[in-house]
Image (cartoon, rainbow, N blue to C red):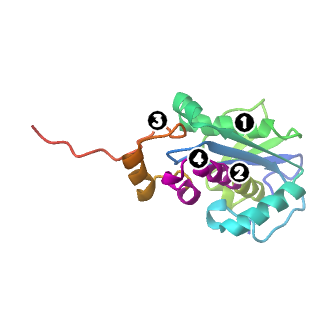
Amino acid sequence: MLLNSHKQSGLECGTDEAGRGCLAGPVTAASVILPKKFKNSFLNDSKIVKSNKRNILKKIIQEKAVSFGVSHVFNAEIDKINILNASILGMHQAINNMNTIPDHILVDGNRFKNYNNIPHLCIIKGDGKYLNIAAASILAKTYRDEFMNLIHEEFPMYNWKQNKGYPTKEHRAAIRKYGITKYHRLSFKLLPDQLKLEL
């Protein structure tokens, strides 16, 4: 069972991102402050919650949260500052987009940068341990999926509606056939290295 929060007092937000390993589209971050007595038996790491339940949870989280924020950091910025910095920037922006300032920040993963001198704690696989991080992971994933569904209509040949920009065989085959789009991350290895002839 996931813990409600790490701190017993004060307002604690959980923050997480989605789309870090994708070849196209933004990395999307979210932050959530949940009520102290919030409970939900379905809420968990977004990677193990099915799509239809994620969308139900998104509505519940947005209705029940004390505050939440979401941010997209797009591919041009990812290429400029690298994916780790873009992920942290997204989390900072998501916290900034909340209408409530937290007293403490719980971060999924092992890397973060100080945000406005608010104490923070990094938790590896935190989205499977704390409800507020799990809630942030659900919002990050659902908001990013919605964006990928939208740009799928613009470039249907990449089937982002299905693969969401991850490096699937289908996505890479489409890159090989059609080339890249304005949404692809140029700093990522979009295709595997080709075999080189020893001359």
Residue beneath disc 3: 186
What residue range appears in magenta?
A: 140-163
Q: How crowded is mark 1: few (under 14 residues within 10 Å), some or many (20 or more)?
A: many
Disc assigned to residue 92: 1
Q: Is the C-beta separation of discs 2 and 1 under 8 Å?
A: no
Residue beneath disc 4: 154
Relative height, residue 16 to residue 116 (above, below): below
Q: How far apart are marks 4 and 2 (CA)?
A: 18 Å
Q: Give the x, y percent position of residue 27.
A: 61, 43
Residue 126 seen in the current view: yes
Q: What residue type is labelled 2?
A: Tyr
The mark closer to the camera, 3 or 1, is 3
Q: What residue type is labelled 4?
A: Glu
Residue, x 75% and y 70% (percent of image)? Answer: 42
Residue beneath disc 2: 143
Magenta-span inclusion, residue 146? yes
Could you tell which of marks 3 and 1 lies nearer the N-terminus?
Answer: 1
Disc assigned to residue 26: none
Helix, strand or loop status at disc 3: loop
Magenta-span inclusion, residue 199? no
Q: Splitting the image into 4 quarters, where does residue 179 fall?
A: top left
Q: Distance between the residues labelled 3 and 2?
A: 23 Å
Residue farthest toward the left in the current orientation of the protein: 199
Relative height, residue 113 to residue 109 (above, below): above
